[in-house]
Amino acid sequence: MTEDKIPRTSRISGFHKLAVDERIEQVAAFAGLADDHRRQLALPSNIDTHLADHMIENMVTTIAIPVGIATNMRVDGRDVLVPMATEESSVVAAVGNAARQCYESGGFATSMSGTEMIAQIQLLDIPDPVRARLLVLERREEIENICNACDPVLVGLGGGFRDLEVRLVDTPAGRMVITHIVVDTRDAMGANAVNSMAERLAPDIAAWTGGRTLLRILSNLADRRVVRARATWTCDAIGGTRVRDAMIDAYQFADNDPYRAATHNKGIMNGISAVVLATGNDTRAVESGAHAFAARTGRYRSLTSWEVTAGGDLAGAIELPLAVGLVGGAVKIHPTARALLAILQAETASDLTRIIAAVGLAQNFSAMKALATEGIQRGHMALHAQNLAFAAGAVGNEVGEVARRIIAQRSINEAAAGTALAELRGQ
Ligand code: MEV
């Protein structure tokens, strides 16, 4: 593609109608991808057996998950194309649709509390926990030095020890003294860095207090690494006041009923986990952090909040802990994750985090809008029908035709797909 044809906007109309190789070319041109990244994206099975064998134990094979590109995203004034790895249909389209509807009103604005992780050290068998807590707090300078000596590279990059907290936790097994070391892990997710520090520090804490240390591990409730994103959808862009008010009712339902909140937040995580996975980050760490944060008030609630602005538009916001990195773990060694990160052009872990939060909000907008209006089945079923056609053995043009027939018959199930395929082939 020549320079003057390179799309600098994420608003690529008709992207879904392009052939797969044409999509790769557009994305590569947008992000100025290097040839090795471009080639990597074109490989259908893109992880080497040797590498996979070194990533986990007892490896026997790999499983490929499709990666789609969410278009129309504008985050903090910058257009981005967002890779999403998911096996679920409609998730990528939902993000692109939500982003299109708020693009003209500025897209998404974000902020972050920081890039600090917490590691916990559990201290037991303490007769005088109040005194023990203060004994640990008095060693702050020493603790800072011990932690920073564990990771001079991190310190050189501007990270390292930031804070110390000691909590008393009452349990049926007695009062425990729980030390938190707070460490800025910068562009790393930071699990290895903080776990090493906690393990190194534990014997000293035991010696200072006369207690026994047991667990030494990070907390996935990364509430020193909270990201926020917000966006405004004009009332006109979303189809008027009835749609807007129905979406507010949908949100209130989720925020006040844990049964609904679980599904509402699952939809948000459809978007968030897809980007986390595509970039080689730890989906389980992000998910457990998000759900723990959603329950921080003692009641499990929505991760998003929605309100009507003074001008009558719909404003949405999301806030959650999001521990992802650009260095370390699979992020650095998985060649496809590297190529997908290059599409995002995220220079820091914070850039990546902000984009992911915006995706979560976009996902929630689309799910709530669909649920509060026509329901999700209509959009969902079109893709589901295609999957059924595939499962029935349809190939090439047969896929679309079988899907069309079972949708028209309103019997979107495996048996109907088999019958439709047999009829099609019999014609
Ligand atoms: C399905 O994967 C996600 C939804 O159930 C989310 C929601 O109900 O908000 C549609």
Image (cartoon, grey):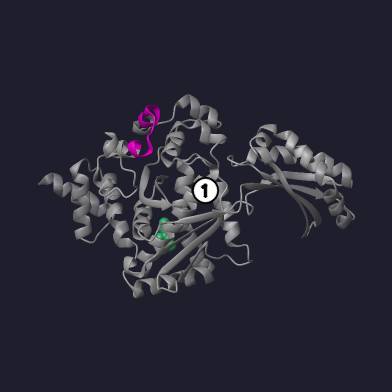
Mark 1, other Cα within 10 Å: few <14 / some 14–19 / many ≥20: many
From the image, tell me which residue sits under label 1: 353
Q: Could you say where residue 58 lies in the image, as x and y percent from the top left?
A: 54, 30
Q: Amino acid at mark 1?
A: Thr
| Residue 374 visible, this angle | no
Q: Is residue 116 left or right of residue 277?
A: right
**Which quadrant of the rendered structure holds the N terminus?**
top left
Left/right of residue 56 with respect to residue 154 in the rendered view? left
Residue at the image position 34 percent from the left and 32 percent from the top: 42
Q: Position of residue 169 (x, y in %)?
A: 77, 58
Q: Quadrant of residue 45?
A: top left
Magenta-drawn segment: 28-39
On screen, 31 above or below 421? above
Q: Is residue 42 visible?
A: yes
Q: Foreground residue, 258 or 156?
A: 156
Residue 30 is covered by the magenta coloring: yes
The quadrant where ligand 1 appears is bottom left
Q: x%, y% of residue 87? A: 39, 46
Q: Where is 174 relative to 9, above or below? A: below
What secondary structure prevails in the magenta region?
helix
- Between 407 and 134, which is closer to the camera in this rendering? 134
Most extreme residue toward the front, as rendered?
A: 4
